[in-house]
Image (cartoon, rainbow, N blue to C red):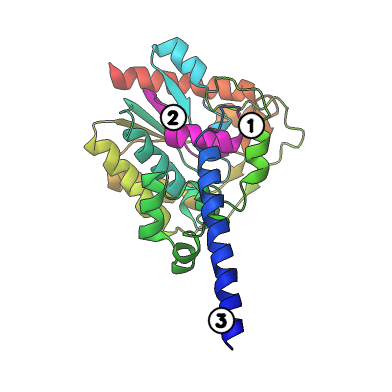
Amino acid sequence: MKKVIINSLIILAIVVACDFIAGFAGNKMLMSTPEVGTLQSDAYQALFKKKADVLILGSSRARHTYQPKMIIDSTGLTAYNAGYDGHGMNYALIVLQSFLERCKPQVVVLDVCAAMVTDEWLNNSIDDVKHFYGLNAPLTNYVRNYGSWQLQAKIHSNLYRLNSTPIWLAKAHTLPSHDCDGYEPQYGNLADTAIINFTNFEINEIQVNCFKEIIETCNKNSIKLIIYIAPSLEVTAKFQKWMKDFCEEQKVMLNDFGCSPVFFSNRHLYFNDSDHLNDTGAHRMTNRVIADINTLLK
């Protein structure tokens, strides 16, 4: 029995040592992530490095739609697109709070789609950046406030927290570094122009609370907030109705281009796939955003 206890303690000590070493080395690598234009390196830039007068938040529909360079050239303001594929309102809130630790944007452009306020992306929005737990205060606070007890128990292990990082970190450190603005253009043209109608929609309380906190944070810091539903061929009437009612209740303006006749009637020119504009469509949509920014700041 004594031998079993000693062996168990030795194994435990080895595991603890490996966990400590992994955390020390992993954190060093994470906090030196170069800017190479991949999703993970862009997340590092959004959470730790970038400053901008115009901050763009949202999912892939934001990442592939709003062009910071156009905004910079037209307004003279700096801009950064922090959209992240498949991430919800909780991630958008964490990015906004992280930005406010470094600077105060004049304008926040928030693109919202149905999945951002349901539970579809609730967990992966955090799982994809869990390696920054303990390094980024807003993320750490979110996990403590909203994370399941299982997540809160596991995330203190560096081996768990860093289990998905080695491959993308190695790739990031081998790619050439270059200054990125977060926008990722899509150049294809849609072949199938069918419109898809979705009928299921059910909000998630945590995502909606994060949405409200984004609005409150902007109001508290005198940041102009512009909310959009980007053009899409995936029509979600229940979501659009909910958004209209929610924005009226929160006293914020909603710009709903979800069923825009301009984009729909020319969808073979403007769409890359059913849910994302191509670069031509993004250019047109960004021009509208620029007009809205200029109007707000006059």
Amino acid at dot 2: Lys
Which mark is nearer the camera, 3 or 2? 3
Q: Amino acid at mark 1?
A: His
> With 208 as the anchor, is 173 left or right in this view?
right
Residue 173 tag number: 1
Q: Which residue range is magenta in the image?
A: 36-62
Q: Quadrant of the N terminus?
A: bottom right
Q: Position of residue 207 (x, y in %)?
A: 42, 53
Instruction: Look at the numbered disc 1 and give the secondary structure of its residue.
Output: loop
Q: Which mark is residue 5?
A: 3
Real-space Cα distance between discs 3 and 1? Answer: 43 Å
- Helix, strand or loop for disc 2: helix
Nearer the observer, 280 or 37 = 37
Q: Which residue is mark 2?
A: 49
Q: Of label 3 and label 2, which has the lower sequence position?
A: 3
Q: Residue at x 38, y 22 (%)?
A: 292
**Residue type highlighted by circle 3:** Ile
> Residue 177 appears at what percent x and percent y?
61, 22
Disc 3 packing (10 Å; few <14; some 14–19; many ≥20) = few
Residue at the extreme right of the image, as rendered: 191
Judge by depth and name the residue closer to the eye, 17 or 278: 17
* Residue 170, image quadrant: top right
